Image (tube, rainbow, N blue to C red):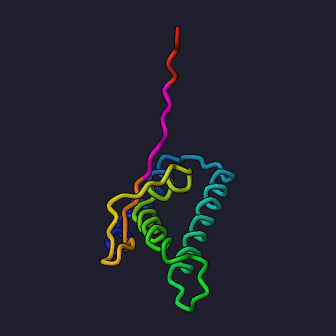
Amino acid sequence: MAKEILERRKDESARRFAVDNELKLDMQRVIVYGAYYSGAMAMARHLEALLYEDDGTSSITLKQRPYIKAILDKIGTSKRNAELFLDGYDIHYRNHKKSKSGKVVSCEVFFTKQKTIDVEIV
């Protein structure tokens, strides 16, 4: 609840700054940005619905559940994590917690970016 209030305050202050300084917004960019994130929200809602279906018709296997839950938890914590996910950064998992039977119960997600270094060979 507190996070939502802080996010709302940040958005309101950004709007106030834009109005006070008479910043011009390109509506085409705003529309594209809105479509980008509304699609992301629909995808997250769909994954969450699949994750928590209990009627046995879910297409997500028991092995996949901890990983998808970790991704949803990560992208739900901040806008930056959602952007990293949508921009296609590599996803890696760490801190796997296993049950007594050896199955993965939970894990943590982190994003990485590949860097390549070109070295000239003489």
Comparing 11 with 81, the one in front is 81
The x and y percentages for residue 13 are 41, 57
The x and y percentages for residue 97 are 32, 69
Left or right, 24 with respect to 81, comes to right
The x and y percentages for residue 41 are 56, 68
Work out which residue is located at the far bottom of the displayed protein and give it.
Answer: 55
Work out which residue is located at the far right of the displayed protein and give it.
Answer: 28
Comparing 52 with 31, the one in front is 52
Quarter in which the N terminus is drawn: bottom left
Q: Is residue 26 above or below residue 41?
A: above
Q: Is residue 112 a member of the stretch shown in magenta?
A: yes
Q: Is residue 15 a member of the stretch shown in magenta?
A: no
**What is the magenta range?**
111-117
Instruction: Give the residue displayed 40% in from the left and 59% down from the top.
Output: 109
Instruction: Give the residue displayed 48% in from the left and 35% down from the top.
Output: 115
Quadrant of the rendered structure where residue 37 is?
bottom right
The x and y percentages for residue 23 are 54, 46
Q: Is residue 51 above or below residue 92?
A: below
Quadrant of the rendered structure where residue 33 is?
bottom right
State whether the magenta stretch is mostly helix, strand or loop. Answer: loop
